[in-house]
Image (cartoon, rainbow, N blue to C red):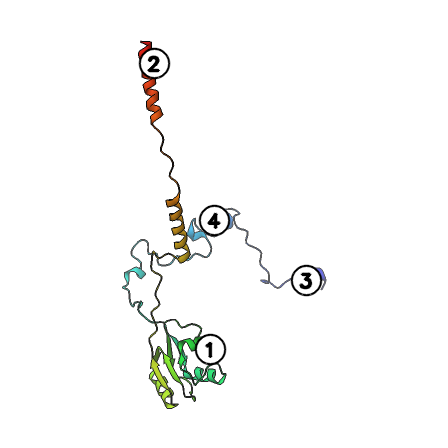
Amino acid sequence: MRLNDLRDLPGATTSKKRVGRGLGSGLGKTSGHGQKGQKSRSGIAIKGFEGGQMPLHRRLPKRGFSNIFAKDYNEVNVGRIQAAIDDKKLDASKPVTVEALVNAGVVRRARDGVRLLGKGELKAKVSFEVTGASSGAVKAVEAAGGTVTLTPMPQRTAKPEGEAAPKKAAKKAAKAAAKSTAKKPAAKKSAPKKAATKKSAAQKDASD
């Protein structure tokens, strides 16, 4: 065995495909992509084409819907509340409201309100003022001597269309005032023209 006799095992290495080298190579002309346009590009998967007839995904009826009036509640378990009280993030002597939960970091944002759930154990006597609560959560709070009061959150209203911001409104008012106080350009005097026409007529009569 010599160094010049060393070889890789059969199949260990493969030669690179040389595309676009004539029709006889099998990978000429379109270089293995087959056709022009979108389907010849990599990463394209056009599915559902049935030769022009109505495809299956358009023949089947629709099912289900999205409720545009659904509420997006932030859910908190009573065990999470007890952990926050133990960490002194919440004061059990004060009512636990949505604002208190946000300020304590128990929930990140209020969204459409906070709903209390009954997973975990609550030992402290706490009065809750939340948007919603499950029956298990109410039982757990009342068993610890606390109360649950449901207070609906105010609706999140979008900014009315056409309402300008205070700064923009002030700028518009300033521009309007500047335009109204600006001096109007003086009207062109037509008297000299009339005098000139009379003079030219008199000169014409004198020449005649």
Q: Is residue 39 left or right of residue 5?
A: left
Q: Pinpoint residue 129: horizontal percent, then vertical percent.
A: 37, 80
Against 154, residue 160 (above or below) is: above
Residue, far top: 208
The CA distance from mark 1 to mark 2 is: 99 Å
Residue 185 percent location from the top left of the image:
38, 36
**Is 142 situated above or below 45?**
below
Which of the two discs, 2 and 4, labels the residue nearer the N terminus? Answer: 4
Query: Which marked residue is nearer to the observer: mark 3 or mark 1?
Result: 1
> Residue shown at 42%/72% (left/top)?
109
Kind of residue at disc 2: Gln
Q: Position of residue 19 (x, y in %)?
A: 52, 50
Whole-number angstrom distance, CA of label 2 to CA of label 3: 122 Å
Q: Quadrant of residue 82?
A: bottom left
Of badges 4 and 3, the one in the foreground is 4
Residue shown at 33% from the left, 20% from the top: 197
Location of mark 2 (residue): 203
Q: Helix or strand or loop: what does disc 4 sit on?
A: loop
Residue of label 3: 6
**Disc 3 + disc 1, Cβ < 8 Å:** no
Give the residue drawn at x 71%, y 61%.
3
Q: Foreground residue, 54 or 110?
A: 110
The one nearer the camera, 83 or 30, is 83
The mark that comes first in sequence, 2 or 3, is: 3
The label number, if any, that marks residue 104 in the structure image: 1
**Tag 1–tag 4 contact (CB < 8 Å):** no
Q: Position of residue 30 (x, y in %)?
A: 47, 49
Quadrant assignment, res 5: bottom right
Mark 4 burial class by Cα count in 10 Å: few <14, some 14-19, many 20+: some
Sequence-first disc among 1 and 4: 4
Find the distance from the CA under tag 4 to the CA under tag 3: 38 Å
